[in-house]
Image (cartoon, grey):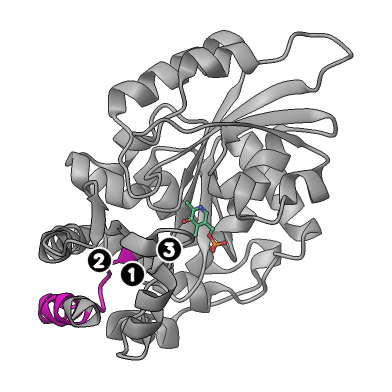
């Protein structure tokens, strides 16, 4: 929902560009170097979307007949059109997320298939951070990393919102991504760039992903125009996320007093609301008619971002209360 910032627009206008399919776009190269540095990975690849970043992570590690373990509600399983199966011939093994957004590692271990021609070969574990706005504990990521190393799995993190996690934990991004072999990082959600994600990881894996990116039609020519906005996103927008988290907390407190609502807020930029009597759709339409956009499937999902100001929160609370009056 965010609009590119003035700094992004001027960086885009002045960006030096070349042909990125030949690796000759200096601005894309600068963005990829920066992504690798921030996540503590050897290499990074600029891709059009988070969906492609996750798909490339899976396809670069898993071949035909392999499988990846993920959450039942994981974006890379549920909300990416089944791309790993459709385009990679890779089967998912979904498990139910626990209330805190983690997967039970005992259960993950149980679902790693034996070396047996009856079974797909389990190659990869995918986690998501933040998951539904919930930050995974660093100690949990360390345990997941240990399990994957022990059992010979790769570990991928869908980090569309991993910058939010780093801000809440108060640690550099690379500390959150230390345990994983690859991480996708969205430049266009909370960080505000108009488009693009990065897939960061080991050089060999990113080299395979670069090949698949071309196969999928994601090789872009003078993509430096977009990468320039991504550089601004990574260098200037990360620390600002704390404001979104604070705004989400204020919003959650504001609407918590309404009897008909059940409000859940964890620690980042999202809150989820259930409306008594199943009136979610009605409330969404009421708010939309008043210029307030709310998403969600089942429960409502309210997301704060750089274009939602502190003053706007009061109006949201007022309109929600108005609906019930
Ligand atoms: C948005 C999102 C993606 C996919 O990003 P797109 O750029 O929309 O393809 C992946 N994972 C999570 C957790 C997301 O929220």
Q: CA distance from mark 1 to mark 2?
A: 6 Å
Q: Disc 3 or disc 2, which is closer to the eye?
A: 3
Q: Is residue 199 left or right of residue 219?
A: left
| Residue 298, x across and y down, in percent | 46, 59
Q: Is residue 2 left or right of residue 76?
A: left
Marks 1/2 in contact by CB < 8 Å: the verdict is: yes
Q: CA distance from mark 3 to mark 2?
A: 12 Å
Q: Which residue is mark 2?
A: 236
Work out whether residue 119 or residue 187 is closer to the camera in this orientation and state it.
119
Work out whether residue 125 or residue 193 is closer to the camera in this orientation and state it.
125
Say which quadrant the N terminus sits in: bottom left
| Residue 52, x across and y down, in percent | 64, 56
**Bounds of the magenta span?**
302-319
Which badge, 3 or 2, is on the more N-terminal residue? 3
Q: Which residue is mark 3?
A: 187
The answer to whether mark 1 is within 8 Å of ligand 1 is no
Disc on res. 232: 1
């Amino acid at each position: 929902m965010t609009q590119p910032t003035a700094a992004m627009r001027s960086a885009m206008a002045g960006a030096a560009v070349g042909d990125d399919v030949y690796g000759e776009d200096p601005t894309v190269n600068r963005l990829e170097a920066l992504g690798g540095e921030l996540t503590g990975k050897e290499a990074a690849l600029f891709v059009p979307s988070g969906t492609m970043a996750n798909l490339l992570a899976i396809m670069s590690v898993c071949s035909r007949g392999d499988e990846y373990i993920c959450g039942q509600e994981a974006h890379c399983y549920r909300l990416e059109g089944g791309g790993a199966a459709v385009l990679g011939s890779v089967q998912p093994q979904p498990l139910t997320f626990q209330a805190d957004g983690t997967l039970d590692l005992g259960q993950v271990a149980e679902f790693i298939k034996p070396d047996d021609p009856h079974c797909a070969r389990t190659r990869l574990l995918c986690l998501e951070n933040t998951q539904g706005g919930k930050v995974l504990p660093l100690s949990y990521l360390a345990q997941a990393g240990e399990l994957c190393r022990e059992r010979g799995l790769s570990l991928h993190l869908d980090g569309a919102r991993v910058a939010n996690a780093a801000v809440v934990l108060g640690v550099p991004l690379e500390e959150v991504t230390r345990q994983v072999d690859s991480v996708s990082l969205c430049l266009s959600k909370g960080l505000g760039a108009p488009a693009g994600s990065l897939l960061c990881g080991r050089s060999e894996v990113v080299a395979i992903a670069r090949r698949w990116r071309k196969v999928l039609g994601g090789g872009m020519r003078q993509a430096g125009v977009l990468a320039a906005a991504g550089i601004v996103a990574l260098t200037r927008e990360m620390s600002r996320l704390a404001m979104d988290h604070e705004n989400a907390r204020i919003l959650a407190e504001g609407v918590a007093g309404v009897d008909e609502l059940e409000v859940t807020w964890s620690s980042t930029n999202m809150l989820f609301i259930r409306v008594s009597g199943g009136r979610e759709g009605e409330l969404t339409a009421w708010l939309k008619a008043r210029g307030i956009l709310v998403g969600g499937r089942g429960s409502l999902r309210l997301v704060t971002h750089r274009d939602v100001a502190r003053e706007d929160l009061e109006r949201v609370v007022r309109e929600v209360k108005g609906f019930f009056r």
